Amino acid sequence: MIERPQIEQSELTQYIPPKGEFDTFRDEDHYKEKLKEWGLSSAKEAKREFWYKDRHSQRLVSIKGYETYGSVAEFNTIVIEFNDGQLSCIHPAYLKEMQQSSFGKESLLNLEDKDIPTVESGDKVESNNAEDSSPAAKELPKKEDEPKPKQAKVKETKPKKEKAPKLELPADKVHFAATVKQFAMTYNPFNEENDEVVVLENVKIIQDNPLEIGFAWCSHSKTLKKFELAVGDQLEFDGKVAAKKLAKGKDVEEEFLVDVPVLYKVNNPSKIVKN
Protein backbone atom coordinates (compact mmCIF):
# COMPACT_ATOMS: atom_id res chain seq x y z
CA MET A 1 0.00 0.00 0.00
CA ILE A 2 1.39 3.41 -1.02
CA GLU A 3 1.24 6.34 1.44
CA ARG A 4 -0.05 9.43 -0.35
CA PRO A 5 -0.95 12.06 2.24
CA GLN A 6 -0.86 14.82 -0.38
CA ILE A 7 -1.71 13.25 -3.75
CA GLU A 8 -5.30 12.40 -4.62
CA GLN A 9 -6.33 10.02 -7.39
CA SER A 10 -10.00 10.84 -7.79
CA GLU A 11 -10.53 8.22 -10.47
CA LEU A 12 -9.49 5.46 -8.02
CA THR A 13 -11.42 6.69 -4.97
CA GLN A 14 -15.08 5.89 -4.42
CA TYR A 15 -16.57 9.02 -2.86
CA ILE A 16 -19.88 8.95 -0.98
CA PRO A 17 -20.84 12.64 -0.80
CA PRO A 18 -23.17 13.90 1.97
CA LYS A 19 -26.86 14.29 1.20
CA GLY A 20 -27.12 18.07 1.14
CA GLU A 21 -26.44 19.97 4.35
CA PHE A 22 -24.79 18.25 7.32
CA ASP A 23 -24.10 19.12 10.96
CA THR A 24 -20.88 20.97 11.78
CA PHE A 25 -19.15 21.47 15.13
CA ARG A 26 -20.17 24.40 17.33
CA ASP A 27 -16.73 24.85 18.84
CA GLU A 28 -13.55 23.02 19.87
CA ASP A 29 -15.24 21.38 22.89
CA HIS A 30 -18.04 20.02 20.69
CA TYR A 31 -15.44 18.63 18.24
CA LYS A 32 -13.58 16.86 21.09
CA GLU A 33 -16.86 15.54 22.48
CA LYS A 34 -17.85 13.96 19.15
CA LEU A 35 -14.38 12.43 18.63
CA LYS A 36 -14.65 10.80 22.06
CA GLU A 37 -18.17 9.56 21.27
CA TRP A 38 -16.91 7.94 18.05
CA GLY A 39 -13.86 6.46 19.80
CA LEU A 40 -11.44 8.33 17.55
CA SER A 41 -9.64 10.42 20.19
CA SER A 42 -9.86 11.13 23.91
CA ALA A 43 -6.71 13.23 24.22
CA LYS A 44 -6.69 16.85 25.42
CA GLU A 45 -5.35 17.96 22.03
CA ALA A 46 -7.92 16.62 19.58
CA LYS A 47 -6.55 15.02 16.41
CA ARG A 48 -7.02 17.02 13.22
CA GLU A 49 -5.99 14.44 10.62
CA PHE A 50 -6.87 10.78 10.22
CA TRP A 51 -5.72 8.05 7.86
CA TYR A 52 -8.06 6.97 5.07
CA LYS A 53 -6.97 3.64 3.56
CA ASP A 54 -8.07 1.65 0.56
CA ARG A 55 -6.53 -0.93 -1.76
CA HIS A 56 -4.66 1.71 -3.76
CA SER A 57 -3.20 4.07 -1.16
CA GLN A 58 -3.54 5.68 2.22
CA ARG A 59 -3.61 9.40 2.86
CA LEU A 60 -4.62 11.93 5.46
CA VAL A 61 -8.14 13.40 5.67
CA SER A 62 -9.86 15.82 8.04
CA ILE A 63 -13.32 15.67 9.64
CA LYS A 64 -15.68 18.44 8.51
CA GLY A 65 -18.90 17.37 10.27
CA TYR A 66 -21.43 14.56 10.48
CA GLU A 67 -24.85 13.35 9.35
CA THR A 68 -27.53 11.88 11.62
CA TYR A 69 -29.66 8.94 10.49
CA GLY A 70 -31.64 5.95 11.75
CA SER A 71 -35.30 5.40 12.59
CA VAL A 72 -34.86 7.48 15.76
CA ALA A 73 -31.79 9.46 14.62
CA GLU A 74 -29.53 7.32 16.78
CA PHE A 75 -26.57 6.97 14.38
CA ASN A 76 -23.94 9.26 12.86
CA THR A 77 -22.02 9.21 9.59
CA ILE A 78 -18.79 11.21 9.56
CA VAL A 79 -18.16 13.66 6.71
CA ILE A 80 -14.45 13.71 5.80
CA GLU A 81 -12.55 16.00 3.42
CA PHE A 82 -9.69 14.87 1.18
CA ASN A 83 -6.75 17.11 0.27
CA ASP A 84 -8.35 17.90 -3.09
CA GLY A 85 -11.49 19.24 -1.35
CA GLN A 86 -13.68 16.22 -2.12
CA LEU A 87 -16.17 15.33 0.64
CA SER A 88 -17.18 11.77 1.48
CA CYS A 89 -19.14 9.96 4.20
CA ILE A 90 -17.83 7.10 6.32
CA HIS A 91 -19.06 5.18 9.37
CA PRO A 92 -17.22 6.17 12.59
CA ALA A 93 -16.29 2.56 13.44
CA TYR A 94 -14.83 2.04 9.93
CA LEU A 95 -12.71 5.20 10.14
CA LYS A 96 -11.54 4.05 13.58
CA GLU A 97 -10.55 0.69 12.07
CA MET A 98 -8.50 2.49 9.40
CA GLN A 99 -6.28 4.05 12.09
CA GLN A 100 -4.96 0.61 13.07
CA SER A 101 -1.69 -0.59 11.56
CA SER A 102 -3.24 -4.02 10.95
CA PHE A 103 -6.02 -2.56 8.79
CA GLY A 104 -6.23 -4.26 5.38
CA LYS A 105 -5.20 -7.76 6.43
CA GLU A 106 -8.71 -8.88 7.30
CA SER A 107 -10.57 -5.73 6.36
CA LEU A 108 -13.99 -5.14 4.93
CA LEU A 109 -12.17 -3.87 1.84
CA ASN A 110 -11.17 -7.44 0.98
CA LEU A 111 -14.71 -8.79 1.02
CA GLU A 112 -15.35 -7.84 -2.59
CA ASP A 113 -12.31 -9.93 -3.64
CA LYS A 114 -13.70 -13.11 -2.09
CA ASP A 115 -16.07 -15.35 -4.04
CA ILE A 116 -18.88 -15.61 -1.49
CA PRO A 117 -21.65 -17.91 -2.74
CA THR A 118 -25.21 -16.78 -2.19
CA VAL A 119 -28.16 -19.11 -1.75
CA GLU A 120 -31.39 -18.11 -3.41
CA SER A 121 -34.70 -19.16 -1.93
CA GLY A 122 -35.55 -22.73 -3.00
CA ASP A 123 -31.96 -23.62 -4.10
CA LYS A 124 -30.35 -26.81 -2.83
CA VAL A 125 -27.04 -26.49 -0.97
CA GLU A 126 -24.51 -29.27 -1.57
CA SER A 127 -22.57 -30.31 1.55
CA ASN A 128 -18.76 -30.55 1.49
CA ASN A 129 -18.85 -33.09 4.33
CA ALA A 130 -18.44 -36.65 3.07
CA GLU A 131 -20.42 -38.00 6.02
CA ASP A 132 -23.42 -35.91 5.04
CA SER A 133 -23.51 -37.49 1.58
CA SER A 134 -23.28 -41.06 2.86
CA PRO A 135 -26.32 -43.36 2.62
CA ALA A 136 -26.57 -43.49 6.41
CA ALA A 137 -26.91 -39.74 6.55
CA LYS A 138 -29.76 -39.84 4.06
CA GLU A 139 -31.79 -42.45 5.96
CA LEU A 140 -35.00 -41.13 7.40
CA PRO A 141 -35.81 -41.90 11.04
CA LYS A 142 -38.22 -44.74 11.68
CA LYS A 143 -41.74 -43.89 12.71
CA GLU A 144 -41.31 -45.37 16.17
CA ASP A 145 -38.26 -43.13 16.68
CA GLU A 146 -40.14 -40.00 15.76
CA PRO A 147 -41.01 -37.85 18.76
CA LYS A 148 -44.69 -37.45 19.46
CA PRO A 149 -45.99 -33.99 18.76
CA LYS A 150 -46.60 -31.96 21.88
CA GLN A 151 -49.93 -30.33 22.37
CA ALA A 152 -49.68 -26.63 21.94
CA LYS A 153 -50.48 -24.59 25.00
CA VAL A 154 -53.19 -22.04 24.58
CA LYS A 155 -51.81 -18.65 25.54
CA GLU A 156 -54.07 -16.10 27.06
CA THR A 157 -54.20 -12.97 24.98
CA LYS A 158 -53.40 -9.92 27.03
CA PRO A 159 -54.93 -6.59 26.08
CA LYS A 160 -52.46 -4.46 24.17
CA LYS A 161 -51.27 -1.29 25.79
CA GLU A 162 -52.11 1.84 23.89
CA LYS A 163 -48.99 3.58 22.64
CA ALA A 164 -48.57 7.27 23.24
CA PRO A 165 -49.06 9.29 20.06
CA LYS A 166 -45.80 10.02 18.26
CA LEU A 167 -44.79 13.65 18.41
CA GLU A 168 -44.10 15.56 15.22
CA LEU A 169 -40.72 17.05 16.06
CA PRO A 170 -39.47 20.21 14.33
CA ALA A 171 -36.44 19.71 12.10
CA ASP A 172 -34.99 23.17 12.70
CA LYS A 173 -33.46 24.70 15.82
CA VAL A 174 -36.13 25.89 18.30
CA HIS A 175 -36.35 27.51 21.74
CA PHE A 176 -36.81 25.30 24.82
CA ALA A 177 -37.76 25.63 28.47
CA ALA A 178 -36.88 22.75 30.82
CA THR A 179 -35.93 21.77 34.37
CA VAL A 180 -32.87 19.72 35.37
CA LYS A 181 -34.20 16.38 36.69
CA GLN A 182 -30.90 14.60 37.40
CA PHE A 183 -27.44 13.69 36.13
CA ALA A 184 -26.96 10.22 34.66
CA MET A 185 -24.63 7.95 32.71
CA THR A 186 -25.25 6.33 29.32
CA TYR A 187 -23.17 3.55 27.75
CA ASN A 188 -21.31 4.53 24.58
CA PRO A 189 -20.52 1.44 22.44
CA PHE A 190 -18.02 3.38 20.28
CA ASN A 191 -15.52 4.04 23.09
CA GLU A 192 -16.91 1.32 25.41
CA GLU A 193 -17.28 3.82 28.25
CA ASN A 194 -20.07 5.61 30.10
CA ASP A 195 -20.73 9.22 29.08
CA GLU A 196 -22.15 11.89 31.38
CA VAL A 197 -25.59 13.23 30.46
CA VAL A 198 -28.13 15.70 31.87
CA VAL A 199 -31.71 14.47 32.13
CA LEU A 200 -34.35 17.19 31.71
CA GLU A 201 -38.03 17.20 32.68
CA ASN A 202 -40.98 19.44 31.86
CA VAL A 203 -39.32 20.03 28.49
CA LYS A 204 -41.38 22.36 26.32
CA ILE A 205 -40.78 23.87 22.88
CA ILE A 206 -41.78 27.53 23.09
CA GLN A 207 -43.61 28.56 19.92
CA ASP A 208 -47.04 29.78 18.78
CA ASN A 209 -48.47 26.36 19.69
CA PRO A 210 -46.20 25.13 22.54
CA LEU A 211 -45.18 21.47 22.26
CA GLU A 212 -44.81 19.42 25.45
CA ILE A 213 -41.87 16.99 25.12
CA GLY A 214 -41.82 15.70 28.71
CA PHE A 215 -38.44 14.11 29.40
CA ALA A 216 -35.31 14.62 27.28
CA TRP A 217 -31.54 14.30 27.68
CA CYS A 218 -28.39 15.91 26.37
CA SER A 219 -24.63 15.40 26.74
CA HIS A 220 -23.08 17.01 29.80
CA SER A 221 -20.55 18.87 27.67
CA LYS A 222 -17.89 21.30 28.86
CA THR A 223 -20.17 24.13 27.72
CA LEU A 224 -22.93 22.95 30.08
CA LYS A 225 -20.49 22.28 32.92
CA LYS A 226 -19.57 25.98 32.93
CA PHE A 227 -23.09 26.71 34.22
CA GLU A 228 -22.58 24.42 37.25
CA LEU A 229 -26.05 22.97 36.87
CA ALA A 230 -27.93 21.49 39.83
CA VAL A 231 -31.10 19.42 40.16
CA GLY A 232 -34.12 21.72 39.95
CA ASP A 233 -32.46 24.44 37.86
CA GLN A 234 -34.83 25.96 35.30
CA LEU A 235 -33.28 26.55 31.88
CA GLU A 236 -34.05 28.19 28.57
CA PHE A 237 -31.97 27.45 25.49
CA ASP A 238 -31.95 26.92 21.72
CA GLY A 239 -31.33 23.52 20.14
CA LYS A 240 -32.57 20.66 17.98
CA VAL A 241 -34.55 17.68 19.27
CA ALA A 242 -34.49 14.12 17.95
CA ALA A 243 -36.28 10.90 18.88
CA LYS A 244 -33.36 9.03 20.50
CA LYS A 245 -33.91 6.95 23.63
CA LEU A 246 -31.45 7.30 26.50
CA ALA A 247 -29.51 4.05 26.96
CA LYS A 248 -28.72 2.87 30.48
CA GLY A 249 -25.22 3.20 31.88
CA LYS A 250 -23.13 0.07 32.34
CA ASP A 251 -22.14 -0.87 35.92
CA VAL A 252 -22.94 2.57 37.33
CA GLU A 253 -24.12 3.64 40.77
CA GLU A 254 -27.85 3.79 41.41
CA GLU A 255 -27.89 7.60 41.58
CA PHE A 256 -26.87 7.72 37.89
CA LEU A 257 -29.73 5.45 36.74
CA VAL A 258 -32.94 6.99 35.39
CA ASP A 259 -36.29 5.68 36.66
CA VAL A 260 -38.37 6.87 33.69
CA PRO A 261 -38.06 6.27 29.93
CA VAL A 262 -36.37 9.24 28.23
CA LEU A 263 -37.22 9.07 24.53
CA TYR A 264 -35.85 12.37 23.17
CA LYS A 265 -32.41 13.93 22.89
CA VAL A 266 -31.59 17.63 22.66
CA ASN A 267 -28.65 18.27 20.32
CA ASN A 268 -26.34 21.29 20.33
CA PRO A 269 -27.96 23.35 23.13
CA SER A 270 -26.86 27.02 22.87
CA LYS A 271 -27.82 30.48 24.21
CA ILE A 272 -28.37 28.84 27.59
CA VAL A 273 -30.03 30.91 30.32
CA LYS A 274 -30.31 29.58 33.88
CA ASN A 275 -33.24 31.08 35.75
Image (tube, rainbow, N blue to C red):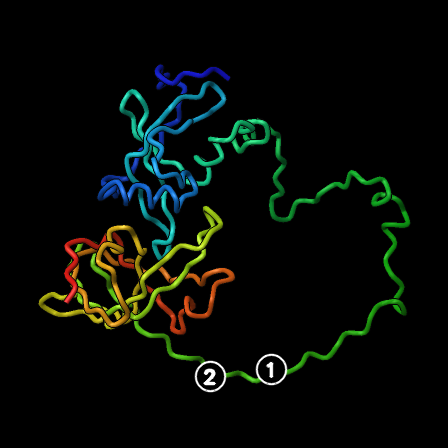
Q: Position of residue 188 (x, y in %)?
A: 44, 52
Q: Position of residue 78 (x, y in %)?
A: 35, 39
Q: Nearer the viewer, residue 217 or 107?
A: 217
- Which mark, residue 159? 2
Q: Position of residue 159 (x, y in %)?
A: 46, 83
As shown in the figure, which amino acid type bears the numbered disc 1? Answer: Lys
Taking the image as drawn, is residue 24 in sight? no
Could you give the CA–CA distance between mark 1 and mark 2, rounded to whole angstroms?
12 Å
Dot 1 falls on a residue whose secondary structure is loop
- Which mark, residue 18? none
Dot 2 falls on a residue whose secondary structure is loop
As shown in the figure, which amino acid type bears the numbered disc 2? Answer: Pro
Taking the image as drawn, is residue 216 in sight? yes
Q: Position of residue 176 (x, y in %)?
A: 17, 63
Q: Residues within 10 Å of mark 1 (few under 14, many from 20)?
A: few
- Which mark, residue 155? 1
Q: Nearer the viewer, residue 150 or 211?
A: 211
Residue 245 in the image: above or below residue 135 = below
Residue at 45%, 25% in the rendered image: 53
